[in-house]
Amino acid sequence: MLVIIGYVIVCASVFGGFVMAGGHAAVLFQPIELIMIGGAAVGAFFVGNNSKSIKATMKALPTVFNGSQYTREMYMELMSLLFDVLSKVRKEGLMSIEGDIEAPEASPLFSKYPLVLADHHIVEFMADYLRLMVSGNMDAFQIENLMDNEIETHHHEGAVPAHVVAKLGDGLPAFGIVAAVMGVVHTMESVGIPPAELGILIAKALVGTFLGILLAYGFVGPLASLLEQKLDESSKMFQCVKVTLLASLNGYAPALAVEFGRKVLYSTERPTFAELEEHIKKSKSK
């Protein structure tokens, strides 16, 4: 929703200002220039990326129009789930959660928290490291190193769409210049026509440069920044799980281990200690 609002503000400011200055908006509508700029950008997009990057980008782009799924409620569900799992381990032993981590979607523990269960990446991450803990063959240092490597891999994979979109935005002004140059070439070959008509051709050529810059900095470039922000948000979920499980491995009680995880969250979404405690109590009563 914010993306659409931003686009409306950009268009209203640029085109509205042009009209208020006495310009005619119709002259800015140059579909041929848009075809040249857009077509060249799409072609460069396919040339400069492999199939994996293209698929990742096409999958990520629709998410920019959705609000963040990483809300305070989501984090409270995650930490409540971690508390339940670690409490069960503390009371019944590590082997008691084997069934839960082998089939999380069928687990009574996981099914209490639908927001977390819907995110298969975080569920898989949690289940994998709980499985390693159950095996008992790795110490906290080894698991932490493995977690760091997996989170880094996740971050690199998630950064691909943002990088691709940023590169695409960087190229749009140049494609706008290409369209403008083509317009100038057309103008020069029509130099014998009346000055009034010549001026129209020059105006059309200049629109290409204008459109390239506007598309780059008003439309495409901001999407790359938004994709990076969404990636950073998703990484916090993994860091929360990592810190909580490592605290448990180092002997801390479930309540204290979850507090470790709470502390790594961004302050805008981080629940207070009292809020988290109340949420855990409610989940116990279900």
Image: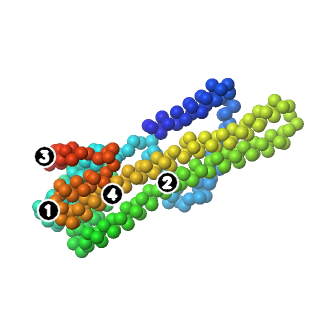
Residue 235 in which image quadrant: bottom left
Of the pair 43 and 122, the residue shown nearer to us? 122
Q: Residue at x 29, y 64 (%)?
A: 128
Of the pair 229 and 69, the residue shown nearer to us? 229
In contact (CB < 8 Å): disc 4 and disc 1: no
Residue 105 in which image quadrant: bottom left
Q: Where does label 1 land, which residue?
A: 90
Work out whether mark 3 precedes mark 4 in sequence or the reverse, and give the earlier one. Answer: 4
Q: Where does label 3 land, which residue?
A: 285
Q: Where does label 2 land, which residue?
A: 161
In contact (CB < 8 Å): disc 3 and disc 2: no
Q: CA distance from mark 4 to mark 1?
A: 22 Å
The type of residue carrying mark 4 is: Phe
Q: CA distance from mark 1 to mark 3?
A: 19 Å
Work out whether mark 2 precedes mark 4 in sequence or the reverse, and give the earlier one. Answer: 2
Work out whether mark 1 precedes mark 3 in sequence or the reverse, and give the earlier one. Answer: 1
The type of residue carrying mark 3 is: Ser
Q: Where does label 4 land, which residue?
A: 238
Work out whether mark 3 precedes mark 2 in sequence or the reverse, and give the earlier one. Answer: 2
Which is closer to the viewer, label 3 or label 4? 4
> Which SS class for mark 1?
helix
Q: Position of residue 178 (x, y in %)?
A: 71, 48
Q: Residue at x 63, y 25 (%)?
A: 20
Q: Is residue 86 left or right of residue 59?
A: left
The type of residue carrying mark 1 is: Arg
Work out whether mark 1 precedes mark 2 in sequence or the reverse, and give the earlier one. Answer: 1
